[in-house]
Image (tube, helix red, strand yellow):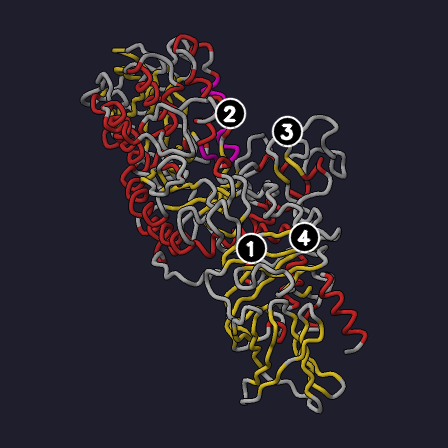
Amino acid sequence: MSSTVNFRFGALLGGTEKNPHAVLGMHAENGNIVIRVFNPHSKSVVVKDTNSTETYQMGLIDNMGLFELVIPDRDKAFSYELVHTTYDNVVYTVRDPYSFWPTISDYDLYLFNQGNHHRIYEKLGCHLCEHENVKGASFGVWAPSAQRVSVVGSFNQWDGRVHQMRMIGSSGVWEIFIPGLTKGDLYKFEIKTPSGEIYTKADPYAFFAEKPPHTASVVYDMDNYSWSDALWLEKRARESVFDKPVNIYEVHLGSWKQEPDDDPESETGFKPYSYRYLAETLVPYAKEMGYTHLELLPIMEHPFDGSWGYQVTGYYAATSRYGTPEDFKYFIDTCHNNGLGVILDWVPAHFPKDGHGLARFDGTALYEHEDKRIGEHIGWGTHVFNYGRNEVRNFLIANAVYWFEQFHIDGLRVDAVASMLYLDYCRESGEWVPNKYGGRENLEAVEFIKQLNYVVYKYFPNVMMIAEESTSWPMVTKPVHDGGLGFSHKWNMGWMNDFLKYVSLDHIYRKHNQNLLTFSFMYAWSENFILVLSHDEVVHGKCSMLSKMPGDYWQKFAGLRCAYGYFFAHPGKKLLFMGGEFGQFIEWKYKESLDWHLLNYPMHEKMSLYVSDLNHLYKSEKAMYELDCSTEGFELIDCNDTENSMISFIRKGKDWRDMLIFVFNFTPRTHESYRIGAPLKTTYTEIFNSDAEKYGGSNVVNTGPISCEDIPMHQKPYSMTLRIPPLGAVILRPDPSLCSE
């Protein structure tokens, strides 16, 4: 053996060889064929020529497990297998993993290093494939500062010496093809850091993982499901979402409903429904209730249940808590075939420090920043992505593409956007580093977000990209080419905070705080908003929606019905967290099922009916959704009756005949003859009343047509008198056929 080979074997054994394929496998040397194999678990290895019956016994040239075969006077390569005999006298035959060309092209690596390989998940990670007519699995991982990277798993006794990978050029990407692996094999990457430490990391691009608390990645085949939602996808590609009803049911899959768990180690005695059982239960429920979309709290793999999914370690893996990737595809397919879109919560703002995850991946701050003033969210105990690094941006943007392409999702709700945009987010003076202009804006994050939205809409027109952005950053939902961030929608956090503060006030104090209701009309059309009553508002001592309401038992339900009526009447798409639809009394608990037994009590049952009817009304009335993003769809009647805590306004569709009038009474007082301005001289019909008896109300309703009079009021040419129920919402429709104008 030459001194060069001796040196490289020393590096191989010492864990510093970045190209083990150069010393292992078959090589032509000095007119001879030389084959070398390194396997510490084998006591003998035989080379078998697959094109003939010839076999060759390899010689053990180092007791650490290095075998060599020299075939003299032969310089033409041939196909071969290795017959290993272990020290336990187990005999098995494999193709030599060091006999294959790379599975990743130079062009793939060029695009990745530029940050522009939008489907890099097809190359990095683990892929079952047939390579050079041999079935197995290819592996690729980015770890530029590692001294060595190996694939370890159930197929090699988790020994990092057996399947050492090669770094391809200066790309920082390590690669190997391992023959014979099959779906379900467990694996990780073993990484030797620059300081010599050994890390064992889950695959950042893994499609599936062990069920927590276990953390291994799983060899998996993603081409395993036949979709039946072609008509849905075709319709989505044709139709804009902006003038359509969007009524989102926000769900945490693990606690929507649960079933008994036979596992004696179960903490609660119950377990979440599976993806497939949710397809048979949650989907018909949401459809019957009148929702248009489901939004799922993060289903990407995460180790800690208490993070609700917001501390992700497996960005490309649907969590195994509820089943397999094809099970989740079945769930989405079922949604689409029942007219429901699917939005996933997505977390590119931060990631946890768990040892098997992205943190210090190759021993350096690879996905994060080295400087903690930039690279950590101290309050959350997580790392911040380094958006200025091409490969990190590529990882995240390709991940967004992956969920749209592989799982046919209809939208991503991007979590914690404000924390991405501001360098001083939740930081005191001296705890953050200004940008190059001395400002607080994270310029690299801004460019990442713009690139993200540009790429998503390049491939998937008319999907939803939703920003949870809690500040007044301008043009969040304006296109990138117009200088905006490029999101389609933004959560209206300002409206939510003001509205919830208002409805939580005792009725007597509301008259002093009517501005909390009206201020949103100053900015309601500055962005494409979604009004949200989300999971964050019913935890951590904030009370459930029902418990926020002041007053006695009856007033709580009446107040919640009125609040929901206002929520649906206000311009903007809608989102309500699970449990709110039937008036759950206690806060949401992520470990437990919702309190479905409450539906056995009349007021909760009637609340469920109320929300369902309101949902269906919203979907059927164009005035309630068609011009959400335009001032042309809204007109105030009166917002100045603070003494009575009353507010009234008009919503309009594109056709002037699609018009509704909304009146809200936020006190327990009944008004038998309350006059408001009317825009048209015609008759008006009450089409919805939150105080109806069937909803648990006192039945203060308006029966029969309501005539208007030639009495100008509220800057309208006509007016009419109405019965206004206590804590009530009234919706009226004008009869355009009788209009005298």
Whether pointer 2 and pointer 1 mark residues with C-beta atoms closer than 8 Å, the reply is: no
What residue is disc 3 on?
Answer: 426
Residue placed most toward the observer, 25 or 311: 25
Cα gap from disc 2 to disc 3, whole angstroms:
27 Å
What residue is disc 1 on?
Answer: 205
Q: Is residue 82 above or below residue 439?
A: below
How many C-alpha atoms fall within 10 Å of the one at disc 2: few (<14), some, or many (≥20)?
Answer: few
Instruction: Report whether 319 appears left or right of 612.
Output: right
Point out the frontmost of discs 2 and 4. 4
Q: Percent from the top left, x then y, of residue 619?
A: 32, 38
Q: Percent from the top left, x then y, of residue 100?
A: 61, 74
Point out the frontmost of discs 2 and 1. 1
Q: Percent from the top left, x then y, of residue 517?
A: 45, 20
What residue is disc 4 on?
Answer: 198
How many C-alpha atoms fall within 10 Å of the one at disc 4: few (<14), some, or many (≥20)?
Answer: some
SS at circle 2: helix
Q: Percent from the top left, x then y, of residue 220?
A: 47, 60
> The C terminus appears in which quarter of the rendering?
top left
